[in-house]
Amino acid sequence: MAEAEKTNIIITEQRESYRPIACRGSILYFVIADLAIIDPMYQYSLEFFSNLFNKRLDKSEKNEDKDKRIIAVIDDITWSFYVSICRGLFEKDKLMYSFLNTTCIFRQSGKISVDEWWFFVRGSTNDYSENKKKVDFLNDTHWTGLVGLEDCHFNFKDITKSFCDESDQKIWRTI
């Protein structure tokens, strides 16, 4: 009985170590499934996905180091699915597919926070009406959006100050 428990623990640890591959696979699957929203012609079966996924598991670079193997498989399935799916997309939809893949991967990994994503999708939901516009080359809507962006992510901290700075305004006006 003790031997069975040890074996079960080892199997569980091994299975969990490969979870990042399964996670990436699920991201790719749901992005591909959502392509039907863009155009009903883009419908891929679970069987298609499973066959390609398993094929890439077999053909991806082998490595004795488990961590390197996991990275190799993730890179391989991501690239292979991208290439395979792009073959069946209209040119106008390839950029959208790339965007969806990238943002879903980044959201899962935490490189895009929930707040950043919702700001991108719907803008700020906070009331910034008391924050009066301080530059003449932006309308009220754009200024409010800028304040919301500054509030949303630390990378944009003090961006409104930059817009108000006379030396920076030349650059911002050009943009």
Image: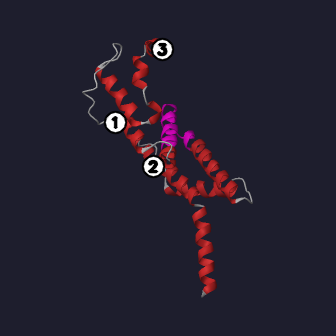
Which three-letter amino acid code belongs to the residue tagged 2? Ala
Magenta region includes residue 30: no
Question: Image check: 137 left or right of 24?
Answer: left
Q: Position of residue 3 (x, y in %)?
A: 64, 84
The residue carrying pointer 2 sits among few (fewer than 14), some (14 to 19) or many (20 or more) residues within 10 Å by Cα, namely some
The answer to which quarter of the image holds residue 132 is top left
Of pointers 2 and 1, the one earlier in the residue sequence:
2
Number of residues whose C-alpha sits closer than 10 Å to that of mark 3, classed few (under 14), some (14–19) or many (20 or more): few
Which residue is pictured at 31% across the width and 18% down the height?
Answer: 139
Query: Does 132 sit left or right of 43 as displayed?
Result: left
Between the residue at mark 3 and the residue at mark 2, the CA separation in whole angstroms equals 42 Å
The residue lying at 57 percent from left, 43 percent from top is: 82
Give how far apart the Cα atoms at labels 1 and 3 are: 27 Å
137 relative to 33, above or below: above
Question: 124 or 128, which lies in front?
Answer: 128
Q: Nearer the viewer, residue 105 or 80?
A: 105
> Where is residue 118 drawn, in percent x and y?
37, 40
Callouts 3 and 2 close, C-beta under 8 Å: no
- Secondary structure beneath dot 1 equals helix
Find residue 171 and name its label.
3
Say which element carries label 3.
helix
Q: Which residue is mark 2?
A: 33
* Mark 3 or 2: the one toward you: 3
Q: Which residue is mark 1?
A: 122
Coloration mode: secondary structure
The percent position of residue 154, horizontal first and vertical second, equals 45, 35
Where the N terminus falls, by quadrant? bottom right
Q: Main secondary structure of the magenta part?
A: helix
User: Which amino acid lies under the numbered mark 3 shown in the image of this protein?
Assistant: Ile
